[in-house]
Image: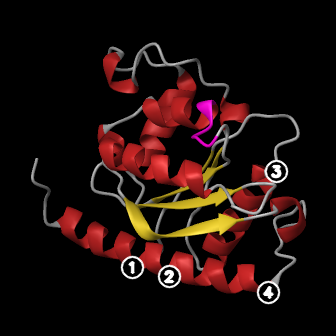
Amino acid sequence: MPLTIPVILGSVRSERLGLRAARLMVAALEARGHEAPLVDPAALQLPLLDRMYKEYPKGEAPEPLERLAALYRRSDAFVVVSAEYNHSVPPALSNTLDHFLEEYFWRPSGICCYSAGPYGGVRAAMQLRAMLAELGTPSIPSLLPIPRVQKALDEAGEPAEEWLTKATRKFLDELTWYAEALRAKRADGTPY
């Protein structure tokens, strides 16, 4: 049964390489028959967090927040694509994630991290794990780190290295397992 798994991109830089990783995730999820809309903070132009979505009177949140809330409520999981800025989570990603809370509950997340260097963004991913758990969308045990993203992926998000195709498949197999398990449990009800 198809899943809905938004791919949340964490960079708004004009020369961002993360779009390559996001395109890889969208294409790989769609190839499995899932819906994988790209959540791009550069396109959404979300305001800096002043009020969370839930703090607006019903129907008065900015239109991009209303769209995202509707998408998130029908989602089964999330893929978060994160760079590493100063060994931490990019500010645009934090801002994008922090607008919501309950919409993430009882849904797993997977972290695809990247960098231009050899570490693939894993230092940011470790901090992101704590953040995602606090939001109610705990990350699966595996990461998909992409070191030297400028060489590993072309502009369309096609892998240039065989290891990345295999790693992507394993990563999405695991995320799919968690998403299907939690969807079944949500259908039976949640603790609150």
Gap in Å between the C-alphas at discs 3 and 1?
28 Å
Q: Which mark is residue 162?
A: 4
Q: Which residue is mark 3?
A: 17
Q: CA distance from mark 2 to mark 4?
A: 17 Å
SS for callout 1: helix
- Residue at image mark 1: 177
Q: CA distance from mark 2 to mark 3?
A: 24 Å
| Above/below status of 118 relative to 92 | below
Magenta part mainly helix, strand or loop? loop
Region of the chain picked out in magenta, as a range? 87-91
**Residue under numbered circle 2:** 173
Q: Residues within 10 Å of mark 4 (few under 14, many from 20)?
A: few
Q: Earlier in the sequence, mark 3 or mark 1?
A: 3
The earlier-in-sequence mark between 4 and 1 is 4
Numbered disc in front, either 4 or 1: 4
- For marks 2 and 4, the one nearer the N-term is 4
